[in-house]
Image: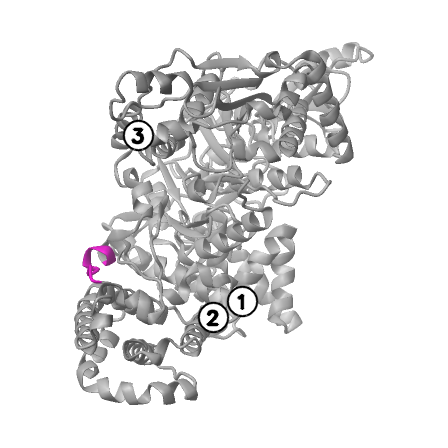
C-alpha cells in the first residue's frame, strides 16, 4: 500500500498552518507535499521556495514557507497568470522576479520572516552555484540578473564569494538592465507596473540566451527545454501543468460544477451489467474456513493491546456534539424550582422540588468504510482487517453506526463481458468490461459482535482481484445516503485503497485513463455532496491530492495501536480546519 | 432603586445639549453628520474618559445612532475587542449615565424585574416589592449595557422583549404596574456570538438566542480587532516604555494568532487585552519572551505551542 505516514500528515498540517497565518489565505494547504490554494494546485513555485527543498540540508525551511506565504499575500494570482509569458525562459524569469518582489515588500514588523527569506534565497544561490548551475553561460546570466534584482530591491548585499563570481556578468549586463532595475525598484509595491518591466527583462534575457546558443547546434535542438537541461532547474510554464487537468472544474461556479460533474459521470458506460454481483462476503466462504480466519484475526488483535476504553472516549469526543442546555425538573436535589416554592413551604419533605441543568452529547454519525480489494492490497489484508475490526468496535461503542464494504471483480482478465465483447466484433470504447463484485462485510444494521465473521472474510485471498473504484464509491455513497431514513446524520465515507483503479481488460479496450478519470470524477462529485464527507486512507500518490481529507497509513506497522490514535488526531485536526468542513 | 447606589436624582435629568457628530467624534467625519443629545454635567454614573482608547468609526456610528435616535444597538465581536468599553467611552464623551449588567446563565427573571423582600419598617417585619435593575433604569436617563447578552438564558431574556421595542413599556406583573420608559433611556447589548451558540468551542456557556428577539435589535454592529497601527497606539499609550518597533512586532504576532484561529489551526488568540498584559508583564519582568509565555503561550494547548513558537520567530 502506498503511504502517507502520520508524521507526513502532522508536518504538512504544521507547515500549512504557518503559511495560512502568515499569508492570511485560509484556503492555502499542503496536500501531498503540493501547495493547494482555493482547492486547486497552485502550480510550480519558483525553485528557491519549492516545497521539495524542505528535505534538503542546505535549505532554510522557514524561509521556504515564508516565501510561499508572502507570495500568496502580496501577489495576485490571476493578474500574474494573465501576464505570464508562455516561453520557457521568459516565464521562468517572470516568475522569479515576481517572487523576489513579494519577498522584498515583507513588512518591517515581521523581522524573523525577513531574515528567513533572505537566508533561503542566499542558501539557494549558493547551493545552485555549488552544484555547477552557473558553469553554463545562461545559468550565470540568469543568476546575475536574479542576484542584482534581489540586491536592488532588498537593499542588502550577498556574500562576497557570490559577488565575486557574478561580478563580471553583472557589470556586463548593467547597461541593459540598469534603467529597468531602477523601474523595478520604484514599482515594487505595484504588481501590475512591476510585471510590465519584468516582462521586458524576461524577453531581453530570453533573447540573450537564445543568441548564446544559436551557433551551437547540439544545444539548439534542445532549446525548448533550455531552462530544464542547462540550468538544472525543473520548470514548466503555467499552462502546461498536468495538475490542472485533474481539477478542471474548480474554476466554475457551484451550480455549473454540479452539472458538469453529473455530465462527466454520465459519460461512463458499462458493457454488460448482468454478471455483476453484490454479495455478503462471508457467504462465499465455508464456515470452517471462516472460523479459521476469525481466530487468526482474534489472535492478531489480541497481540496489539488496544486500549478500547480510551479510544472509545476519544472517538466519541470527535464525532459527538453537545445538545443545547435543558432543565431536568422534579429532581431530588440541585437548585430549587421556583414553581414549587409553595410546596417547599407546605410539604418540605416531598423531595422532587428541584431542577437541574444538563447538557447531553449527541452522536449522529454514520461511517462507511470502503475497502479496495485489488490484488495489490492482498499483502496488507491482515493489517486492514485488524484495523477495520478495531475501528468498527470502537465506533460502535461511541454510538456511531458503521458499514464495511469492499470492491473487486469476480475474475481476472475481463471475465464473461470481455469474451462477449470479443465475440461481438470488438466495437471501440465498449465501457467497463469485467464482472464487478461488490462485497458487504458488515451493514449498518448488524452489530459489531455479529458482524465479526463478515469482517474476517477480508482475510480470504481469493476476493483480491482487480478493482473498479469509481462505481464502488457511487455504490457506497448511495447506501450511505439511503440508510439515513430522513434523519439528519453526518455521513462519512472512508476509502482504503492503494492506488488507481485497475482492470486490464477495460483499460485495454477503452484507454489508459478510462477508469482513472471516472474515479477522479466520482471523487470530485463526492466532494461536492453537501451531506457526505469523503476521506481516503493509504491512497496512492497519483490520486492522493484529489482528496481533501486523508488519513495516514504506516508502512511498517508495529504491534501497538498507534494508528488508531493517529487517525483520531487526524480526524480532529481536519475537522477543526474550517475550510475543509 | 438598588441599595447602595449613589443618591442621585436622575429622574429629573435630561440631555439638554446637542452636539454635532463631526465636531465631537472626528473619527466619524467620513459619515453623514447628525446631532446627538448630550448631558451638560457629569455625575457618578458617567464613566470616565480614557484618552488612550481608539474609537472604531463604524461601531461608533452605530452606537451614536442608538443614542441619537433611540435605536436598540447590539455589538458583536470576539473577546478583547473592547465592545463594552466602546459603549462606555462614547457614553463618557456624552456625559450619559451608564450601567452595565453582566448576564450569566444563572440570572433569573427575579434578578432583572424585582422581587418581594422581607424588611423591617417601624420595628415590624413587612414584605415589599423591590424593583430590579431593569425597571429601575427604565425610568431614568441611563444607557443600560447588557453585557454577554448571549450568555443569558434564552427564556429569561424574554423579560426584556417588550422593552426592545421603541417606547416599549414594561409591565410589572407582580405589581400590576406599567412603566413608561424615560425618553433618555437607552439599551445596548454586547455578545461574542450572533445568537448561534458556542459553535467554535471558544465561547463556552453561550446560548442559542431566539431569533424573534434578535430581530428586535435595530442595529447589529460588528467590532473586529483594530487596525495594526491603531492597536499599536493603544498598547503604546498603556505601556509607554515599549518602543514603536517592538509594539509593531507584538501586534503582528497578535495578528498571526488571529489568522491562525480563523483557519482553525489555533484554538485561542491574542486580544488587545493580551497585548497590553504582555507589555505590562514585560515592564515587570524585563524579558519579552518570558512575559509572552506568561501572558499568552501558557494559555495554548500543548500541541499548538510549536506553532505559536514559529509565529514568535517570525516577528522577533
**Residue placed at 33% from the left, 49% from the top?**
B58
Dot 3 or dot 2: first in sequence order is 2
What residue is pinned by disc 2? Answer: A116
Mark 2 chain: A
Residue at 39 percent across and 44 percent down: it is B222
- For the question of whether residue B237 can be seen, the reply is no
Instruction: Give the answer, above or below, for where A170 lies relative to B90.
Output: below
Question: Residue A167 or B302: which is nearer the viewer?
Answer: A167
For the record, the magenta segment spans A80-87
| x then y, percent, for residue B289 | 61, 68
Between the residue at mark 1 and the residue at mark 2, the CA separation in whole angstroms equals 9 Å
- Indicate the quadrant where residue A553 lies: top right
Q: Report helix, strand or loop for mark 2.
A: helix
Indicate the secondary structure of the residue bearing disc 3: helix
Q: Is residue A294 magenta?
A: no
CB under 8 Å between callouts 3 and 1? no
Whether labels 3 and 2 share one chain: yes
The residue that disc 1 covers is B313
Which is in the foreground here, disc 3 or disc 2? Answer: 3
Q: Is residue A84 above or below residue A477?
A: below
Crowding at mark 3 (Cα within 10 Å: few <14, some 14-19, many 20+):
some
Which of labels 3 and 1 is toward the front? 3
Q: Quadrant location of the N terminus of chain A? A: top right
Direction from residue A550 to residue A294 in the image, left or right: right
Give the image location of residue B259, x and y in percent: 45, 52
**In front of the other: A407 or B125:** A407
Q: Pointer 3 indicates a residue of which chain?
A: A
Apparent side of residue A213 relative to residue B130 in the rendered image (left or right): left
Q: Which residue is mark 3?
A: A510
The front one of B217 and A439 is A439
Q: Position of residue A42 (x, y in %)?
A: 35, 52
Amino acid at each position: 500500500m502506498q503511504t502517507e505516514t502520520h508524521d507526513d500528515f502532522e508536518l504538512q498540517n504544521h507547515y500549512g498552518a504557518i503559511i495560512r497565518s502568515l499569508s492570511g489565505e485560509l484556503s492555502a494547504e499542503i496536500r501531498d507535499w503540493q501547495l493547494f490554494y482555493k482547492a486547486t494546485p497552485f502550480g510550480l513555485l519558483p525553485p528557491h521556495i519549492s516545497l521539495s527543498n524542505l528535505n534538503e540540508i542546505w535549505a532554510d525551511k522557514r524561509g521556504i514557507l515564508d516565501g510561499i506565504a508572502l507570495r500568496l499575500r502580496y501577489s495576485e494570482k490571476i493578474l500574474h497568470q494573465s501576464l505570464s509569458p508562455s516561453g520557457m525562459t521568459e516565464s521562468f524569469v517572470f516568475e522569479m522576479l515576481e517572487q523576489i518582489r513579494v519577498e522584498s515588500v515583507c513588512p518591517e514588523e515581521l523581522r524573523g520572516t525577513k531574515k528567513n527569506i533572505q537566508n533561503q534565497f542566499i542558501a539557494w544561490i549558493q547551493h545552485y552555484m555549488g552544484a555547477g548551475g552557473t558553469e553554463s553561460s545562461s545559468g550565470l546570466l540568469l543568476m546575475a540578473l536574479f542576484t542584482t534584482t534581489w540586491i536592488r530591491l532588498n537593499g542588502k548585499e550577498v556574500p562576497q564569494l557570490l559577488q565575486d563570481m557574478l561580478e563580471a556578468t553583472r557589470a556586463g549586463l548593467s547597461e541593459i538592465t540598469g534603467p529597468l532595475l531602477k523601474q523595478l525598484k520604484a514599482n515594487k509595491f505595484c504588481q501590475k507596473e512591476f510585471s510590465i518591466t519584468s516582462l521586458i527583462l524576461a524577453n531581453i534575457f530570453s533573447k540573450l540566451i537564445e543568441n548564446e546558443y544559436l551557433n551551437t547546434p547540439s544545444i539548439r535542438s534542445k532549446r525548448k527545454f533550455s531552462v530544464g537541461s542547462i540550468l538544472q532547474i525543473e520548470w514548466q510554464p503555467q499552462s502546461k501543468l498536468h495538475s490542472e487537468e485533474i481539477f478542471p472544474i474548480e474554476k466554475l461556479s457551484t451550480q455549473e460544477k454540479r452539472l458538469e460533474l453529473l455530465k462527466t459521470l454520465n459519460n461512463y458506460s458499462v458493457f454488460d451489467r448482468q454478471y455483476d454481483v453484490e454479495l455478503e462476503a462471508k457467504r462465499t466462504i465455508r464456515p470452517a474456513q471462516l472460523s479459521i480466519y476469525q481466530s487468526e484475526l482474534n489472535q492478531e488483535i489480541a497481540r496489539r493491546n488496544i486500549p478500547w476504553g480510551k479510544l472509545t472516549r476519544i472517538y466519541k469526543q470527535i464525532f459527538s456534539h453537545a445538545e443545547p442546555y435543558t432543565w431536568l425538573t422534579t429532581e431530588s436535589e440541585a437548585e430549587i424550582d421556583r414553581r414549587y416554592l409553595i410546596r417547599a413551604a407546605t410539604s418540605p419533605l416531598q423531595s422532587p422540588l428541584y431542577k437541574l441543568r444538563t447538557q447531553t452529547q449527541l452522536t449522529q454519525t454514520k461511517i462507511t468504510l470502503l475497502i479496495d480489494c485489488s490484488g495489490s492490497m492482498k499483502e496488507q489484508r491482515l493489517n486492514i482487517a485488524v484495523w477495520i475490526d478495531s475501528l468498527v468496535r470502537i465506533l460502535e461503542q461511541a454510538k456511531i453506526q458503521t458499514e464495511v464494504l469492499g470492491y473487486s471483480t469476480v475474475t481476472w482478465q475481463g471475465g464473461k463481458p470481455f469474451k462477449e465483447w470479443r465475440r461481438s466484433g470488438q466495437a471501440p470504447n465498449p465501457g467497463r468490461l469485467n464482472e464487478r463484485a461488490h462485497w458487504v462485510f458488515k451493514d449498518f444494521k448488524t452489530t459489531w459482535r455479529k458482524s465479526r465473521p463478515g469482517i474476517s472474510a477480508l482475510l480470504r485471498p481469493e476476493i483480491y482481484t482487480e478493482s473498479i473504484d469509481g462505481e464502488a464509491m457511487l455504490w457506497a455513497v448511495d447506501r450511505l445516503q439511503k440508510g439515513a431514513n430522513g434523519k439528519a446524520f453526518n455521513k462519512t465515507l472512508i476509502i482504503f485503497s492503494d492506488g488507481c483503479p485497475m482492470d486490464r481488460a477495460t483499460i485495454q479496450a477503452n484507454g489508459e485513463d478510462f477508469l482513472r478519470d471516472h474515479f477522479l470524477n466520482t471523487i470530485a462529485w463526492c466532494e461536492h455532496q453537501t451531506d457526505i464527507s469523503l476521506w481516503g486512507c493509504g491512497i496512492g500518490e497519483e490520486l492522493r491530492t484529489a482528496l481533501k481529507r486523508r488519513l495516514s497509513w504506516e508502512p511498517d506497522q508495529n504491534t501497538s495501536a498507534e494508528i488508531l490514535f493517529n487517525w483520531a488526531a487526524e480526524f480532529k485536526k481536519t475537522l477543526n480546519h474550517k475550510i475543509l468542513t | 432603586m438598588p441599595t447602595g447606589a449613589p443618591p442621585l436624582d436622575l429622574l429629573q435629568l435630561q440631555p439638554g445639549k446637542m452636539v454635532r457628530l463631526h465636531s465631537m467624534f472626528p473619527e466619524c467625519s467620513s459619515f453623514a453628520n447628525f446631532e446627538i443629545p448630550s448631558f451638560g454635567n457629569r455625575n457618578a454614573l458617567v464613566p470616565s474618559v480614557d484618552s488612550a482608547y481608539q474609537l472604531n468609526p463604524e461601531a461608533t456610528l452605530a452606537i451614536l445612532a442608538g443614542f441619537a435616535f433611540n435605536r436598540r444597538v447590539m455589538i458583536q465581536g470576539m473577546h478583547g475587542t473592547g465592545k463594552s468599553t466602546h459603549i462606555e467611552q462614547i457614553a463618557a464623551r456624552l456625559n450619559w449615565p451608564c450601567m452595565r449588567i453582566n448576564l450569566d446563565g444563572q440570572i433569573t427573571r427575579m434578578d432583572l424585574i424585582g422581587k418581594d423582600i422581607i424588611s423591617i419598617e417601624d420595628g415590624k417585619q413587612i414584605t415589599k416589592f423591590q424593583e430590579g435593575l431593569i425597571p429601575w433604569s427604565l425610568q431614568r436617563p441611563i444607557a443600560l449595557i447588557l453585557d454577554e447578552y448571549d450568555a443569558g438564558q434564552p427564556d429569561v431574556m424574554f423579560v426584556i422583549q417588550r422593552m426592545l421595542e421603541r417606547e416599549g413599556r414594561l409591565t410589572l406583573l407582580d405589581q400590576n404596574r406599567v412603566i413608561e420608559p424615560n425618553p433618555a433611556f437607552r439599551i445596548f447589548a454586547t455578545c461574542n456570538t450572533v445568537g448561534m451558540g458556542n459553535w467554535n468551542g471558544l465561547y463556552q456557556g453561550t446560548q442559542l438566542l431566539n431569533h424573534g428577539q434578535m430581530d428586535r435589535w435595530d442595529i447589529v454592529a460588528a467590532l473586529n480587532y483594530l487596525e495594526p497601527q491603531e492597536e499599536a497606539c493603544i498598547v503604546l499609550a498603556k505601556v509607554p516604555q515599549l518602543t514603536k518597533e517592538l509594539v509593531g512586532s507584538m501586534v503582528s504576532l497578535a495578528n498571526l494568532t488571529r489568522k491562525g484561529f480563523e483557519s482553525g489551526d489555533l484554538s485561542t488568540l491574542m486580544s488587545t487585552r493580551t497585548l497590553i498584559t504582555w507589555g505590562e508583564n514585560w515592564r515587570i519582568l524585563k524579558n519579552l519572551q518570558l512575559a509572552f509565555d506568561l501572558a499568552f503561550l501558557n494559555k495554548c494547548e500543548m500541541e499548538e505551542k510549536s506553532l505559536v513558537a514559529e509565529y514568535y520567530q517570525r516577528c522577533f
